[in-house]
Image: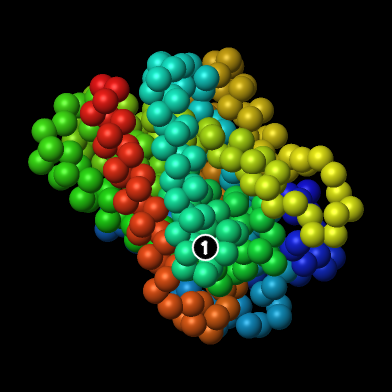
Amino acid sequence: MAADLYNDLEPSPKSSWRDLLPGLTVAVLATMAAAFVADHYGAPLTLMALLIGLALNFIGADPRMGPGLGFASKTLLRLGIVLAGARITVGQIIDLGPLTLLAVLVILLATLGAGIAFARAAGLGSAFGTLAGGAVAICGASAAMALATTLGERRANQAQLALVLVGISAASAAAMFLYPILAHQLGLNDRQAGFMLGASIHDVAQAIGAGYSFSDEAGQVAAIVKLTRVALLAPVLALVAAFFRPENGKKTGIPLPWFVVGFFVFAGINSLGVIPTMVSNGAQDVATACLACAVAATGIRAPMSSLLETGFKPLLVIILASLVALALSLGGALILL
């Protein structure tokens, strides 16, 4: 429970490895099915994992599934976040230049703030706005899962998280198709298009894929910009921890979740060039698998009755925050590049 900053998550009951097998097996099989669909039909892995998880939602009511699904949606999530640091290097970030890096940071914070503002205006609260806005601003479903872990289940419940995952996956898939067309219509050059796509599209795979669909140079720029946003996940989690103080007032300071520290450690080690390419690629594959499995387990565990009662307002928050990110990214591309 190290990532549960303020004891908001319900304590997991002690379980043996045999107790984990039923739920974990279902989550792994759902992830494998999602990977098959994604590989053969070009669909986003995260979206497929979530949809298959939601299709298996009826299984989540079986108490035998609880320990394994909880392990997949919490422990595997945190492991995936740590291993995601293996795709970042300090050199990649420095190559952007200070002004471009500052622009990425401003766009991220403005998008996060817009999500909070839109959510509060819709009566959904700051916690949901942080969840939705952060998912748009940083790295889609991965950021949503990490933010939900940091906020705690009392502030961001499973139904809200599942809705954000649905919305963010759909928005990212649409952006991967539409944003390169917009870049062509506006006559952006390769660097401008790469910056716009990398700074505005939600998930890593979609952002990089959209960049390379424009041109090779745009793909390279989009990858660096997008990975910079991923690197900012850890400080944003620390910022969220600072603002969402414990309600009982017993804790002080700003505790840093272990998976945040692990993320930075892996990024630092990767920057030294001591990790072989094969190992780095393997770590990325494991991170992708862990995150997809966590998303599938979240879909299985999601209380569908509550999810269906939320209405259109939560999705509207994601759409508006996405438009803010797009507008700011386009403005930054035109001004800086």
Query: With respect to residue 68, does 133 lie above or below?
Result: above
Type of the residue with mark 1: Arg
Q: Is residue 9 left or right of residue 133?
A: right
Residue drawn at x 79%, y 59% is: 247
Residue linked to disc 1: 120
Residue 93, horizontal then vertical, whole percent: 46, 22
Q: Is residue 241 left or right of residue 148?
A: right
Query: With respect to residue 136, does 23 lie above or below?
Result: below
Residue 337, horizontal then vertical, whole percent: 26, 22
* Nearer to me, 229 or 279: 229
Query: With respect to residue 254, does 76 lie above or below?
Result: below
Instruction: Residue 281: tell me if it is visible.
Output: no
Instruction: Please identify the quadrant where the N terminus is shown.
Output: bottom right
Residue 192, horizontal then vertical, whole percent: 24, 28
Q: Residue furthest right?
A: 250
Here the colouring is: rainbow
Characterize the local packing of mark 1: few (<14), some (14-19) or many (20 or more) Cα atoms within 10 angstroms.
Answer: some
Secondary structure under badge 1?
helix
Tag count: 1
Residue drawn at x 47%, y 81% is: 308
Residue drawn at x 85%, y 44% is: 252
Q: Quadrant of residue 155?
A: bottom right
Q: Residue furthest front?
A: 121
Instruction: Residue 193: tell me if it is visible.
Output: yes
Residue drawn at x 89%, y 53% is: 250
Residue 22, horizontal then vertical, whole percent: 66, 71
Q: Quadrant of residue 314?
A: bottom left
